[in-house]
Image (cartoon, grey):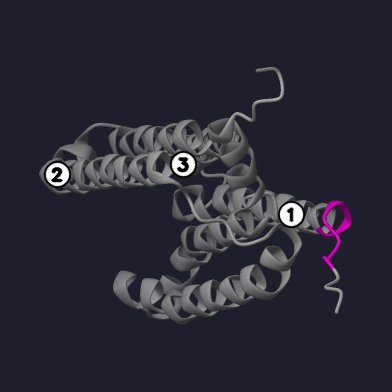
C-alpha cells in the first residue's frame, strides 16, 4: 500500500527531533567545564574531590533548568513523545552498553594507574578511546549524527593537551585549554540549535 505509514521510521524521526533543541549539547558542554575549570580550582587549595564537588550543584541546576525548558518550550512545540516497545528496548540496550563501557574505563583506570605513570599517553589514550566508544554507541542507537563529531572532538582534546603540556606550552596537561574550547563549541552549537528549533517549531496555539 503506497500510503502506508512506516510507524517505526516516523517514531525515529520524531524521537530525533526531541534532540534538535540543543539542550543535550549545552548540558554536555557544561559537564566538560569541570575538566576545564576543575584543575584550576586545585591551584587555590581544593582537592580533586572538592573541585569536582563544586560542579554538582551546577549540574543539578542545569539539569533542572533543561527539564523545565523541555516541559514548557520543547514539548508544546512537538508534542509529548512516548517511545514504543522497540524504542524502549533499544534505550535499555544502549544504557547497558554505556554502563559496561564506563565500568570498563573505571577498572582500567584503577588497574593501570601506576603503569600509566611510566607509559606516556596511556591515561589520555584510554580516556580518548572510552569517549569515542560512548559517543559512537550513543550516536548509532539514538540516530544523532553530531555525537560522532563530539566524540572525536573530545577524544583528541586530552591528547593535544598532553602534547602541549610536555612542550611546556600549557599547564595542567592542557585541560583548561582543550576542554575549555570543547565546552565552548558544544554550548555554542547547542544555543544555535535552540534558536533554530524555536524558529522551525513555533508554539502550537490551542483553540477553544
- Residue 118 locus on image (x, y percent): 20, 36
Q: Camera-side residue: 59 or 141? A: 141
Instruction: Point out which mark residue 158 bears.
Output: 3
Q: Is residue 102 left or right of residue 4?
A: left
Q: Camera-side residue: 171 or 93? A: 93
Q: Is residue 125 left or right of residue 200?
A: left
Instruction: Point out which mark residue 5 bears.
Output: none
Q: CA distance from mark 2 to mark 1?
A: 38 Å
Q: Camera-side residue: 12 or 69? A: 12
Magenta stretch holds residue 199: yes
Mark 2 or 1, closer to the camera: 1
Query: Mark 1 touching mark 3, by CB under 8 A?
Result: no
User: Within 10 Å of the Cα at label 3, are there few (<14), some (14-19), or many (20+) other Cα atoms?
Assistant: many
Q: CA distance from mark 1 to mark 3?
A: 21 Å
User: Within 10 Å of the Cα at label 1, are there few (<14), some (14-19), or many (20+) other Cα atoms?
Assistant: some
Label 1 sits on residue? 188
- Relative to 98, is 4 above or below? above
Mark 1 or 3, closer to the camera: 1
Which residue is at 58% across, 56% downward?
A: 24
Magenta span of residues: 198-204
Q: Identify the image quadrant of the C terminus.
A: bottom right
- Residue 175 locus on image (x, y percent): 50, 52
Which residue is at 40% across, 74% downward?
A: 51
Which residue is at 63% across, 68% downward?
A: 70
Mark 2 or 3, closer to the camera: 3
- Residue 22 locus on image (x, y percent): 68, 55
Of mark 1 and mark 3, the one earlier in the sequence is 3
- Residue 109 locus on image (x, y percent): 20, 46
- Judged from the image, the secondary structure of the residue bearing numbered disc 3 is helix
Furthest residue to the front?
1
- Judged from the image, the secondary structure of the residue bearing numbered disc 2 is helix
Label 2 sits on residue? 114
Amino acid at each position: 500500500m503506497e500510503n502506508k505509514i512506516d510507524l517505526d521510521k516516523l517514531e525515529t524521526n520524531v524521537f530525533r527531533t526531541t534532540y534538535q533543541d540543543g539542550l543535550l549539547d549545552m548540558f554536555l558542554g557544561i559537564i566538560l567545564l569541570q575538566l576545564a575549570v576543575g584543575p584550576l580550582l586545585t591551584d587555590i587549595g581544593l582537592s580533586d574531590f572538592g573541585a569536582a564537588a563544586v560542579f554538582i550543584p551546577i549540574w543539578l541546576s542545569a539539569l533542572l533548568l533543561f527539564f523545565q525548558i523541555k516541559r514548557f518550550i520543547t514539548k508544546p512545540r512537538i508534542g509529548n513523545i512516548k517511545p514504543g516497545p522497540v524504542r524502549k528496548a533499544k534505550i535499555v540496550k544502549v544504557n547497558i552498553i554505556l554502563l559496561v563501557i564506563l565500568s570498563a574505563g573505571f577498572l582500567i583506570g584503577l588497574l593501570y594507574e601506576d603503569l600509566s605513570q611510566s607509559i606516556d599517553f596511556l591515561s589520555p589514550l584510554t580516556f580518548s578511546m572510552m569517549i569515542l566508544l560512548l559517543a559512537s554507541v550513543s550516536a548509532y542507537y539514538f540516530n544523532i549524527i553530531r555525537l560522532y563529531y563530539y566524540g572525536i572532538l573530545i577524544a583528541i582534546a586530552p591528547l593535544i593537551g598532553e602534547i602541549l603540556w610536555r612542550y611546556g606550552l600549557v599547564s595542567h596537561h592542557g585541560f583548561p585549554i582543550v576542554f575549555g574550547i570543547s565546552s565552548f563549541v558544544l554550548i555554542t552549537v547547542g544555543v544555535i540549535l535552540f534558536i533554530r528549533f524555536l524558529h522551525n517549531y513555533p508554539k502550537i496555539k490551542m483553540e477553544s
